[in-house]
Amino acid sequence: MYTFKPILTKIIPKMPLKTMGVAGLLMIITVILMAVLANFLTPYDPTKSVGLSLQPPSLNHPFGTNKIGQDMWSRIVHGARTMLLVVTLSTIMSIVIGVPLGLISGYVGGILDRILTMIMDAIYAFPSLILAIAIAAALGPGIVNTAVSIAIVYVPTYFRMVRGQTLNVKSQLYVEAAVAIGAGPISILARYILPNVISIVVAVFTLSVADVVLTEAGLSFFGLSVPAPTPDWGFDLRAGHPYLVSGYWWLVTFPGLMIIILAVGFTFLGESISEYLGLREVRA
Amino acid sequence: MASLKIFIVARVLALIPTILILITLVFFIMRVLPGDPVIAIVGMKAPMERVMELRRELGLIDENGNEIPLVTQYFNYLSKLIQGDFGRSLIWGKRPVLVEIMEHLPATIELAIAGFLVSIILGVSLGVIGAGSSGKTNNAVRVYSAVTYALFIPWIGMMFQLVFSVWLKILPVGGRIGVGLEPPTYTGLYILDSLISNRLDSLTSSLRHITLPAITLGLIISGVFSRITRTSVEEVLRQDFVVAARARGLPEYKIMMHVLKNSFIPILTMMGLQLALLMTGAVLTETTFSWPGMGTFLLERIQYRDYTTVQGTVVFFALIVALVNLIVDIFYAYIDPRIRY
Amino acid sequence: MSDTLLEIGNLKTYYFAHGSVIKAVDDVSLGIYKREMVGLVGESGSGKSTLGLSIIKLVPPPGKIVDGKIIIGGEDLLKLRDKELRRIRGRKIGMIFQDPLTCLDPLRRVGDQIIESIMSHIKVNKEAAREMALKVFERVGISPERIDDYPHQLSGGMRQRAMIAMAVVLNPELLIADEPTTALDVVVQSRIMDLLEDLKNERKMSILLITHDLALVIERCDRVVIMYAGRVCEIGSVKEVSNEPLHPYTKLLIESIPNIEGTQMELKPIPGTPPDMRNPPPGCRFWPRCPYVLDKCKSVEPSILEIDNRVVFCHLYGG
């Protein structure tokens, strides 16, 4: 009944994981399409009042309307834009800051490495959302500010993984050989370390991006993301909450569902890729 | 056990730089505010005395009206922290931040414990089941872990509210306890206090109110726990001593106990490190269920621009995280003798 | 024969993985007599470890015992349920493994582990069990203070002794030793083998020594079983087999043993590699590497041939 250490290799049923990966990919693509085709998917302006207040889903308004008469479906598809924009921006920032720092820190070592690692570890240990809240509160609303807040929180994730991988590669024989020939640090970094690091960055990305989505949702839930009329799923969730008691269920169900679809999609994809690459413990 | 004591001391010393970094980080974040925070609080038309007063309170200027350099501000802040002064609120009578934190902390602790219990029960059992089986069940557990982690807490909470409070009407939609039913304060945790003071009505009310939030929080975190448990137990089951133990004819339940004890360590460390997750989750859960804890408190103060309180609270969070990590490390060393020697 | 302790009849243990079947033990029959040390020799992949594990039904999944019988004391072990098997494991049949470090629970003291073994099988209280543990520790040559140590605090040799202690404390009739000395240096190896021999004589125990080291078996064992690719090649007393090996594989094995005294110029390894067990060659599995191969060998499996007290599976002798 219980699995032992087998003498032969363990069976990894790749099939279900592949299905997971594919399912995840589909979910993500759906959201991306929503964002890209937003203007074609709905005739209404999400920031304007276009209907009666608090209408349940109908042919005209497939997801109903909220208190101020905005069409929920249009807020959803335009909200996809907001979400994806913030997520993309913040990820780019995290990578641009975290990866080079990780490379340098891992390669150069010494005091610089020690200090950087300590700082990064401290940030990493701190609850992501709370830190993001603190930074976002200080910076104020706006897409860029929000992206920055989130980016800072996830820099350590990239830093650690890249640094680890750098240390790994650095100790390989072929790198020592290159140094012996007289190759300079930049060429070593570029030719040997960077290629190995790229696959790790992809892995980290796929696993942490779900977290980023949830953090953005969290920030916008607390009103710390983009300013008011711009549609954002977390914000709509919060806005619709007070009406829940009176039974207006469509105000919260759909925005929340979208958040989950995107987050789960990324998670599924990330799980399947990380299993494929054989990684563990890459959780943000 | 002398080696354990040395270990503890070493760990505590290592803690100091971490805490320092976090405090510094928070401090400088708060000073990054674009624009004048004071104006943001009192508005453009405030009288000069009020502005100066606030400036003094924020520690930006000294009694004579001179600007204090940033570095000095920093050290002032540090020295106050060491003495236990987390600052004072900028609103509502300048109450010490620490006092206000202490008032709201028990609610969060109660919720966190309840959520933690739910997640352990759910997560560990699923993890063990998943590890002990192969194929479909194993995969089902993996999918469960993946999905639950990605669920947005407020939405799950709201769905529960929708079903159980609005449609079925069997559980309250929010709050911590029914009006006027608070038990006398012993620990600050309503459930315990109700039991101590033998008040059935308080007990029932608090239990009813904590159910949905605890399940919401517990559900999300159980995903992580189930994955940690599963991988841990699977790892241990693969080790040779399990086969050797079976070869000695030990009964199955004893072997499972050994397996669990061995998997315990990585499970525990990871659990301790999930405190960050627990805190984030608690904050989100509290706001969804109007639970009067640290999360709601923090949020409220952000909206009121009570910067000193926000700063003090975040620093407090940082200290808690550092402390728990320390405890986990120590416990780890206690359980696994290999670490000490 | 009333002298037979354990009899294995037509044992088949297969591994089912990735859609293919690996016949790790394919129709093996052998007997172990009382008070003897039998060496089970084979290369990696020959199935010898699987055979050892099969005796006490501890073959890990995806492996499964498909057919056969294992009879000890009148009972067929393969027909017993797990609960009843537990009675046998550790009590009637003991087993020790190659790497004692990974085989002992790293989180508990060695004394506690052996006490637990004792108390799982017989009704004694903790003090009595501890007494027994101390005694057996002394017997295997570990100083009694070390009973409260953790496994990582003992040296490799001592850990192996601790494992032996745990395996023999309840006086089993058979001890299965799976490569017990492979991870040890030669001097320690010799001492451990001395210990095993002494225990065999004292406690009237039989030992099944599973190893790839034929030289060790020739030196220490009474009888030898040679296995190749899941099948038995030859069985006989050590004296007879080493003096006059019948099966070609045995011959090559013996020739490959380096001679410390002689004027050997080169090592003589056996050419070729063991077969892929998912697709073993038809007929006699050794034929691709056999210097005496006949046409018959390539298609017909040799059947059992008994010559005096020996057993061989080879067409050369008319099988």
Image (cartoon, rainbow, N blue to C red):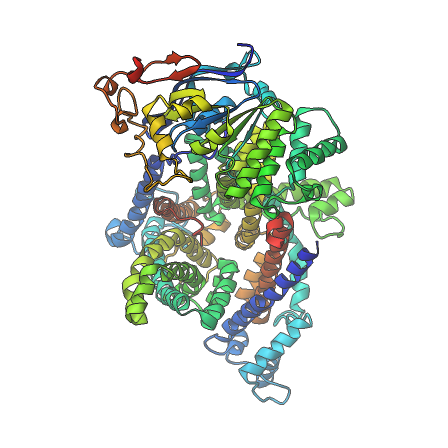
Q: Quadrant of residue A197?
A: bottom left
Q: Position of residue A268 (x, y in %)?
A: 37, 44
Outermost residue toward the left in this view: C295
Q: Position of residue B89 (x, y in %)?
A: 63, 70
Q: Position of residue A84 (x, y in %)?
A: 33, 56
Q: Position of residue B223 (x, y in %)?
A: 49, 43
Q: Disc count in the image?
A: 0
Camera sees residue B143: yes
Q: Quadrant of residue C12?
A: top left
Outermost residue toward the right in this view: B197
Viewer-proximal residue, C123 or C298?
A: C298
Above or below, A263 relative to C258:
below
Above or below, B130 relative to A56:
above
Above or below, A206 relative to B258:
below
Viewer-proximal residue, C5 or A9?
A: C5
Quadrant housing the C terminus of chain B? bottom right
Above or below, C255 relative to A31:
above
Viewer-proximal residue, C222 or A226?
A: C222
Q: Is residue A48 left or right of residue C103?
A: left
Q: Residue at x 38, y 21 (%)?
A: C232
Camera sees residue C103: no
